[in-house]
Every structure is written in C-alpha cells, then in structure tokens.
Image (cartoon, grey):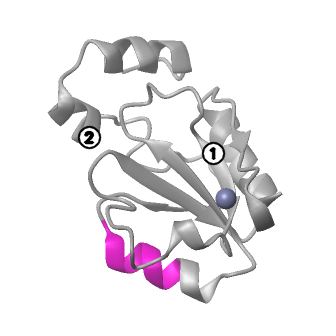
Amino acid sequence: MRSSNSNTVRRLAERSDDSIGSQGNKLLSRLMANDPAGCTLFWDDEDAYLTWVHANQDGYVVNCDKACVMSMYPMIHRAIHKSMWTPKRKNYTTGDYFKVCSRSASDLGVWAANRKMTMTRCLVGKCR
Ligand SMILES: [Zn+2]
C-alpha cells in the first residue's frame, strides 16, 4: 500500500479477514527507514519481546492491535507495568497484538507519527 494514512489502514483492516489482520499489515509489521534507531519491533516473537522488556525496565512499550481497528491503540506503557510481561498472560506479540519498544518515549512518538497514528497513554498505576 502506498499511503501511510491511518484511515486507509483502518479501512483495509475492516474489510479484511483475521489472517490479513494478523499477518498482512505491511505498514505495522516492519519498521520504516524514518523510524528512530532506538525502536525495536516485536511481531510474533514472544521470547525476544520478553527478553527486551525484562532487560529494559526503565523503557517503554507500545501495544497495538495488528488489525489497527481498536481506537485505544497504539497505547504506550512503561516497561515496569506488570501486565506487559507477567507470565499469567500470553500472546504479547502473537495473536492479535504486537509491540514496539524503546528506552525513549519520544522515539515511540515518532514511530506512531510516521504512521499518522495517535498514541494513547496507559493510565493504570505506575504507568501514569
Ligand atoms: Zn501500562
């Protein structure tokens, strides 16, 4: 797809089936040349994601739905937020969601802006 407009992504996602929502989103499933070098994308890679988040507890995690249809996403969390890494949950980067991580919140703001996406903030506990 040529456009980086999030409305285009949303329209495409709404008329696609689940398999396209989870795998076919080229705009989200890889980093772009103008994304900050500090951003790391985790897509269908649980081990690498959990390794990063445990090693960078002073960093930030953006959670996003792969289909790009949920208005509360992308949402930025502090890596210390337990729901970003508790073993009680699974499918952090598989299934319907993926993560973009950085030690810099502003890097993640650029990642979202590069896709014309509006990031929301987690308001739970230590994330505030
Ligand atoms: Zn949070």
Q: Residue at x 32, y 68 (%)?
A: 45
Q: In this view, does 69 lie to the left or right of 105?
A: left
Estimate how packed mark 1 is, as few (under 14), some (14 to 19) or many (20 or more) residues with alpha carbons within 10 Å. Answer: some
Q: Give the quarter of the image for residue 90.
A: bottom left
Q: In which quarter of the image is residue 94?
A: bottom left
Determine whether 101 is above or below 33 in the image.
below
- Residue 65 falls left or right of residue 109: left
Q: Is residue 10 left or right of residue 55?
A: left
Mark pair 2, 1: CA separation: 18 Å
Q: Can residue 110 be seen at all in this image of the molecule?
A: yes
- Is disc 1's CB within 8 Å of ligand 1? yes
Residue at image point 77% right, 63% down: 125
Q: Can residue 36 be seen in this view?
A: no
| Closer to viewer: mark 2 or mark 1 | 1
* Residue at which label 1 appears: 75
- Quadrant containing ligand 1 reads bottom right
Task: Provide residue 7's location: percent of width, then percent of height.
Answer: 52, 13
Front residue of 95 and 4 = 95
Q: Position of residue 77 (x, y in %)?
A: 68, 58
User: Is 65 in front, or is 86?
Assistant: 86
109 lies above or below 9: below
Q: Give the range drawn in magenta.
A: 45-52
The residue that appears at 34% across and 79% down in the rendered structure is 47
The answer to whether 44 is drawn above or below residue 103 in the figure is above
Q: Which amino acid does label 1 sit on?
A: Met
Task: Name the spot of residue 57 as percent of width and height, x first.
Answer: 68, 81
Answer with mark 2 or mark 1, whichever residue precedes in sequence.
2
**Which residue type carries mark 2?**
Ser
The main secondary structure of the magenta stretch is: helix
Q: Name the residue under label 2.
A: 22
Instruction: Report how many numbered discs are placed on residues in the image.
Output: 2
